[in-house]
Image (spheres, grey):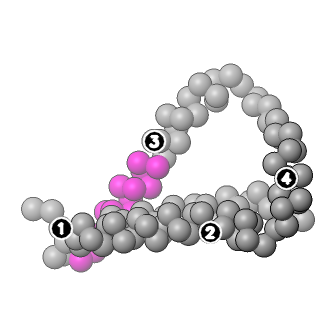
Amino acid sequence: MVGLTYPLSYVLTNLLAFTGNTFLLCSDSNQDIILNSMALKFITENDEIIFESMVPQNLRDVTEKLPPIKVSHSTKLWGLYKPYLIAFFIGLITLWTYSDVCLDDPAKEIA
């Protein structure tokens, strides 16, 4: 079960990023952008809201006191370039989303 958690989380995170980018990039007005960004923020924090309301306080205290899981990276270069690679791929996803989804409607094309 633990081995399935990470890939499922990865897929859901990417799906949420794609869908959130689509909603934000294809918004027609500033009001829609604000509304869609607030909805996206609610969805991303929904797990914390459920955790706070459903888990008893003593179990939350035990969870907070657990030591962090240490993950060793295979190379030092990955740690050095990781933020830049993540930003690059987020930019690629954003451009692809905008060009593929938002520009399908000819009325939204930029002159």
Alpha carbon of mark 3 to alpha carbon of mark 4: how far?
A: 38 Å
Between the residue at mark 2 and the residue at mark 4, the CA separation in whole angstroms equals 20 Å
Alpha-carbon distance for marks 3 and 2?
Answer: 27 Å
Disc 3 or 4, which lies upstream in sequence?
4
Q: Position of residue 67 (x, y in %)?
A: 86, 39
Where is residue 95 drawn, in percent x and y?
35, 55
> Of label 2 and label 4, which has the lower sequence position?
2
Judging by the rendered image, the residue that carries numbered circle 4 is 61
- Type of the residue with mark 1: Glu
- Density class for disc 2 (Cα within 10 Å; few <14, some 14-19, many ≥20) is few
- Residue 93, horizontal then vertical, whole percent: 44, 55
Indicate which disc, 3 or 2, sits on the residue closer to the N terminus. 2
From the viewer's side, name the closer residue of 39 and 61.
61
Task: Pick whichever of labels 1 and 3 is earlier in the sequence.
Answer: 3
Mark nearer the N terminus (4 vs 1):
4
SS category of the residue bearing label 3: helix
Report the amino acid beneath label 2.
Asn
Residue 88 tag number:
3
Please tell me whether mark 1 sits on a helix, a strand or a loop: loop
Question: Any mark on residue 109, and which?
Answer: 1
Q: Are marks 3 and 4 in contact (CB under 8 Å)?
A: no
Q: What stretch is highlighted in magenta?
A: 90-105
Q: Which of marks 3 and 4 is in front?
A: 4
Give the label, 4 or 1, closer to the camera.
4
Residue designated by label 2: 46
